[in-house]
Amino acid sequence: MGKTSIENTLSLVNAQLKSHNIEISLHGEDFMLHGLEGEFQQVILNIISNAKDAIVHNRKEYGKIDIILKNKKIIITDNGGGIPEEIIKRVFEPYFTTKEQGMGTGVGLYMSKIIIEQNMGGHLHASNTKEGAEFIIDFTQES
């Protein structure tokens, strides 16, 4: 499980991304991951879906999501404007959502963190870049 799992996940959302004029790219070297493929794919889908929502919400004419596999890390960046500094530390809390009322459950990133950190032995971090958000799934500490 690794790059192929990500490619399969992207094939599920490609049409939806294209309909919003969002380009997605996947680069880097493959590496083996341990865990349940369905859970891992859910994490990737969740992060990509949030990136798409941010790009659409901020009315970006040209959206982009880049996924880079490097040194046992998966780096997902977007140009959706980023996560407001006052809430970035809270995005992994259960039931915390930035979506309008009734639109988000607030369990997506929380469950993503649980899957990566408790089930797969990695770490999930969020930060901002100049253009948007960056999520790093880090498996370098994996035993």
Image (spheres, grey):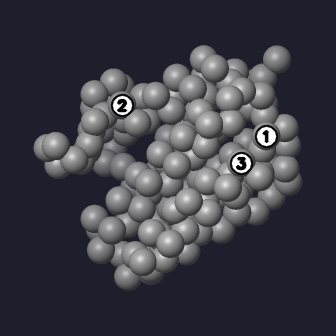
Residue 30: where, in percent of width, then height?
A: 84, 50
Whether residue 126 is situated above or below residue 34 in the rendered picture: below
Q: Which residue is painted at 33% across and 24% down in the image?
A: 94
Question: Mark 3 or mark 2, which is nearer to you?
Answer: 3
Check if mark 3's residue and mark 2's residue have beta carbons within 8 Å.
Answer: no
Using residue 1 as the reference point, say whether residue 106 is left or right of it: left
| 93 or 107: nearer the viewer | 107
Residue 25: where, in percent of width, then height?
A: 65, 68
Whether residue 65 is situated above or below residue 59 in the rendered picture: above
Q: Secondary structure at mark 2?
A: loop
* Residue count near mark 1 (Cα–Cα under 10 Å), binned few <14, some 14–19, many ≥20: some
* Residue count near mark 3 (Cα–Cα under 10 Å), binned few <14, some 14–19, many ≥20: some
- Mark sitting earlier along the chain (2/1): 1
Residue holding disc 1:
1
- Mark sitting earlier along the chain (3/2): 3
Residue 99: where, in percent of width, then height?
A: 24, 47
Residue 3: where, in percent of width, then height?
A: 77, 51
Q: Amino acid at mark 2?
A: Val
Q: Which mark is residue 107?
A: 2
Q: Which residue is painted at 60% across and 17% down in the image?
A: 118
Q: Which residue is painted at 62% across and 37% down in the image?
A: 38
Whether residue 119 is situated above or below residue 5 in the rendered picture: above
Marks 3/2: CA–CA distance:
22 Å
Residue holding disc 3:
5
| 23 or 19: nearer the viewer | 19
Marks 2/1: CA–CA distance:
24 Å
Check if mark 3's residue and mark 1's residue have beta carbons within 8 Å.
Answer: yes
